[in-house]
Amino acid sequence: RRVLFRSTEQMRLQSGGQLTIGSTTAGAKLDVHQTTGTAVGRFTSYGNTNDIELRRTGGTQLSPTATSSSGTVLGRIFGQGYNGTSYTSAASISLETDAAGGTSTDMPGAIVFNTTPDASGTLTEKMRINNGGALSFGGSANTGTTGQVLTSQGSSASPIWTTTSIKFQIPDR
C-alpha cells in the first residue's frame, strides 16, 4: 500500500509488513529515509518521561520464555557510515545480561561500549559497566576495587587498574 500526498509517494507498507518512509524499499520493519537536515525522529511527551524500550524474550511470540542466561544481548544501538559500497559500524552500545537472572524482578545487566579501530571493520569492546557498577576497559574483565586507580598505558592501550600507596590527605585549617 502506498500513501501519497499531492501525487508524491510519502510512505509504503510492504507486503511483508515493513513500513518504509521516504523510500520505496525497506530493509527493516520500520525503515525511515531522510534527505533534509531536520531530525529523523522526534518523541515528545507532555508531563511524563520519554522512554524507549528495547525488549527481548526467549521462545516465540505466542510462547515467550525468560531471558535468563548471562551474555544475552537485549538491544543495541549502532552508528554506521557509508564506505562507498555498504554501511560499516563505527561504534555501538550494547545492553546485555551479565549474570543469570530472569525471575520476576531479577535481570542483572551491563552496558558495553564498542568502537572500530582505524584500518579495521570490526567492533571491539572498549568499556563495560557491569551489573555491580564496576567499570572495565578494553574488553578486560579487570574491574577496579576500593583503593585502586586507573593508570594510563599510553595512547594505544587501555588503562589498567592499579593499587597505589599514595595517600591523599587534606590538611586541617
Image (cartoon, rainbow, N blue to C red):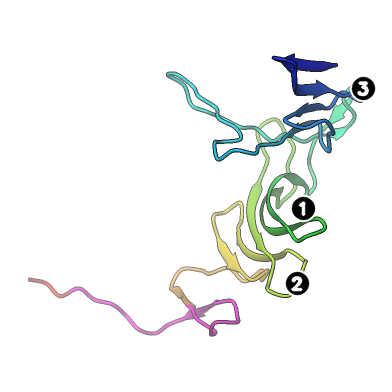
Give the residue type that dot 1 points to.
Answer: Gly
- Gap in angstroms between the C-alphas marked 2 and 1: 24 Å
Of the numbered discs 2 and 1, the one sitting upstream in the chain is 1
Circle 1 — which element? loop
Give the residue type that dot 2 points to.
Answer: Ser
**Which mark is on residue 71?**
1
Does residue 136 appear to the left or right of 97 in the view shown? left
The image quarter containing residue 149 is bottom left
- Gap in angstroms between the C-alphas marked 1 and 3: 35 Å
Mark 2: few/some/many CA within 10 Å (<14, 14-19, 20+)? few
Residue nearest the observer in this picture, 23 or 157:
23
Circle 3 — which element? loop
Q: Which residue is mark 3?
A: 15
- Residue 160 is inside the magenta segment: yes
**Which mark is on residue 120?**
2
Q: Which residues are magenta?
A: 151-170
Of the numbered discs 1 and 3, the one sitting upstream in the chain is 3
- Residue 159 is inside the magenta segment: yes
Q: Are marks 1 and 3 in contact (CB under 8 Å)?
A: no
Residue at x-position 43% and y-position 82%: 164
